[in-house]
Image: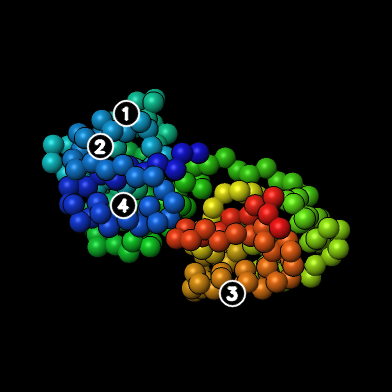
Amino acid sequence: MSNRILIADDEEDVLALIGANLKSAGFRIATANDGLSALAAARREPPALVVLDIMMPGMSGLEVCRELKRQTSTAAIAILLLSARAEEVDRVLGFELGIDDYMVKPFSPRELVLRVKAILRRHSPPIAYSPHLAAGKISIDREKHLVTIDGAAVPVTAIEYKLLCAFMERLGNVMSRDELLSKVWPVAAAIEPRTIDTHLRRLREKLGSGGEQIQTVRGFGYRMDATAG
């Protein structure tokens, strides 16, 4: 699935704020300052998702949404709508047109990134379940909830087990702290992202030389490399 996000807003500070936070989360960014430019950019190179402001010159966000959903080539693009107004009619019309989510300004940049990731997860095909996972020295038997290193069992906590499964399901891909949190803890849990660091440090220690397969990608998060260690 593409990781390109198109941000459309006529406020430069909003474009910069959203763009910086999405880039830090590992996304590629394109921007537009008005509705017509946003529509043209989406048609030229369809992104995975558009962060779309309602009030823009030339063509409103709702009109852009209507045009995107009308055409086969752009109908599958996910849309997160932004508005400076908390009007119910805007939300209702947006969802009727096919948007995926709605946020009112001012918003939390971190929450916006989390919502973008949640939308893209819903749009992505499900990961095929496998009862056995293997990467380098590390193996997991999901039927037995058993983790082994070179065939020797390693005792891990439930959280460490979930983290390891998440890495091995997406072998080689970078996963942010927020993404790992969403996979391991319930949505309602008030957990700080840095908590992940503590659990991963303990997990690496338990895995011994296999712990080198869990690599830190500075500024982005972590990934598992099957060839390390």
Q: Secondary structure at mark 2?
A: helix
Label 1 vs label 2: CA separation? 9 Å
Residue position marked by numbered label 3 in the rendering: 198
Residue 47: which quarter of the image? top left
Residue 44 vertical placement versus 135 (above, below): above
Label 4 vs label 2: CA separation? 15 Å
Q: Secondary structure at mark 1?
A: helix
Identify the residue at image location x=37%, y=32%.
46
Mark toward the viewer: 3 or 1: 3
Q: Point out the tag, 1 or 2, that comes first from the N-terminus.
A: 2
Label 3 vs label 4: CA separation? 29 Å
Mark toward the viewer: 1 or 4: 4
Disc 3 residue crowd, few under 14, some 14–19, many 20+, Cα 10 Å = few
Q: Point out the tag, 3 or 4, that comes first from the N-terminus.
A: 4
Q: Point out the tag, 4 or 2, that comes first from the N-terminus.
A: 4
Q: Which mark is residue 38?
A: 2
Label 3 vs label 1: CA separation? 44 Å
Tell me whether circle 2 and circle 3 mark residues in contact (CB < 8 Å): no
Q: Secondary structure at mark 3?
A: helix
Q: Which amino acid type is shown beneath numbered disc 4?
A: Gly
Q: Which mark is residue 19?
A: 4
Label 1 vs label 4: CA separation? 20 Å
Which quarter of the rendered picture does the C terminus lie within?
A: bottom right
Disc 1 residue crowd, few under 14, some 14–19, many 20+, Cα 10 Å = some
